[in-house]
Image: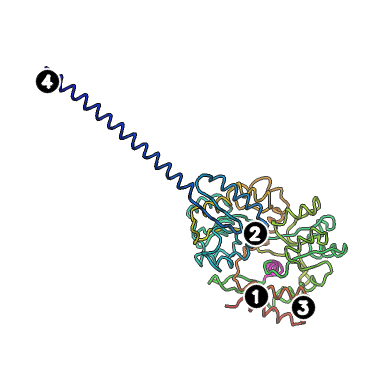
Amino acid sequence: MRKKICGLFLGILCTMALAGCGQKGETELAGQADLEEKTNLEKKESQKVELVVWGAEEDAQLMNQIIQSFQENYQGQADFQISFEAQGESQCKDALLGGLEDGADVFTFADDQLNTLAAAGAIEPIENADEIRSRNLSAAVEAATVNDQLYAYPLTADNGYFLYYNKQYITEEQAKTLDGILEAAAAGSKLFTMDWTSAWYVYSFFGNTGLQVGLNDDGITNYCTWNQADGEIRGIDVAQAMLRIAGNPGFASYTDEQFLDGVKNGTVVAGVSGVWNSVAVREAWGENAGAARLPTYNCNGSQVQMASFSGCKLVGVNAYSEQQEWASKLAEWITNEENQKLRFEMRGQGPANIAVADSEEIKQSPAIVALLEQSEFSQLQRVGGKFWDPVSIFAGNMAAGNPSGQDLQEQLDEMAEGISAR
């Protein structure tokens, strides 16, 4: 009996000892886990994340505000050093491809540059593509896609143009035709302006005439029939119409910046531009600020509806960024619902985000409504790099009144040949 009691006592002691060892081991493991978590957190906090963001100069205040909110949202996860640099969105591709390793980590650009950037390996397919697609308008998603792969984050769905007009000088009825606009502008010794140095705007005169321009199957070179010498509307008919417009005292070929200066100083009462100027126009003209689809123009005795290129602004992540994960997070942050709403409020730009696009604020914007009306007569911009200069040279001659006196058909042929060059 004594042996049994001793054995039982020894068993209890061993059990207590083992339990004590287990508790000690668990405590040590828990402490080790806490230490590892603390170490990881300290590593994250001490991790320096340097990012450069490129965007339009006019977006500087907006982008800096968005960057600030991003840093606040991820506060404590890294030591952020994020800077914004102004870079024209239409020239972003050229600036980036000039030195990818020295380029911005995150950048905004016009969608027509997407194919080139993707082909050059400057951007790569987005990992959470389905999630991004579900948030944005189908047209914006299409503009950000190459071969069924989403390569960029949709930012706006408003990269088009329409008519701004001052109701104090031009009635709603006059705004329907370019003849009416020019007559009203000239009568008040004011101007209607449009940028004929930019082929993007000059497309307006050719787009709904049956004359064609676009990309060949190789995705690089163009086809062009703008010099067509037969048919209901010929290339020469468009050229003569442009000369008549250029000769009107109510017209001036102004860049976008000159248009806005004229709006502010009172010399310009109508012009072709986009939603990026909506806030400034409204501030200058107040309740007299009007917006409408592009007018018709007189071409070979018929009123032809002016066309437009359409497109989207996108946000890309540099494939050569040393901070891929954080650059992608920032690009997604810039294009999220909250910041697309903020972009509309501060810059008047139309969102790609479905929820924001369906809001009442958007539906009450005259500029966005005008853009939607113009969309019926617009075409997604898909032309190769050889398109731009020949058109600008031709339109520049028309804007100046064809000072050399060169035969119009010859100029049209030269333009079409330049556009189609391989």
Return the residue nearer the eye: 212 or 325: 325
Q: Earlier in the sequence, mark 1 or mark 4?
A: 4
Please report contact status of discs 2 and 3: CB closer than 8 Å, yes or no.
no
**Residue at which label 1 appears:** 225
Please report contact status of discs 1 and 4: CB closer than 8 Å, yes or no.
no
Q: Which of marks 4 and 2 is nearer the N terminus?
A: 4
Q: Nearer the viewer, mark 4 or mark 2?
A: 4
Q: Which of marks 1 and 4 is in front?
A: 4
Residue 34, image x, y percentages: 40, 39
Classify mark 2: helix, strand or loop. Answer: loop
- Which amino acid lies under the numbered mark 1 shown in the image of this protein? Thr
Q: Nearer the viewer, mark 1 or mark 2?
A: 2
Residue 213, image x, y percentages: 63, 71
Magenta-highlighted residues: 201-210
**Residue at which label 4 appears:** 3
In this rendering, position of residue 351 left or right of residue 264: left
Q: Which of marks 1 and 2 is nearer the N terminus?
A: 2
Calculate the distance from the C-alpha at mark 1 to the C-alpha at mark 2.
34 Å
**Residue at which label 3 appears:** 402
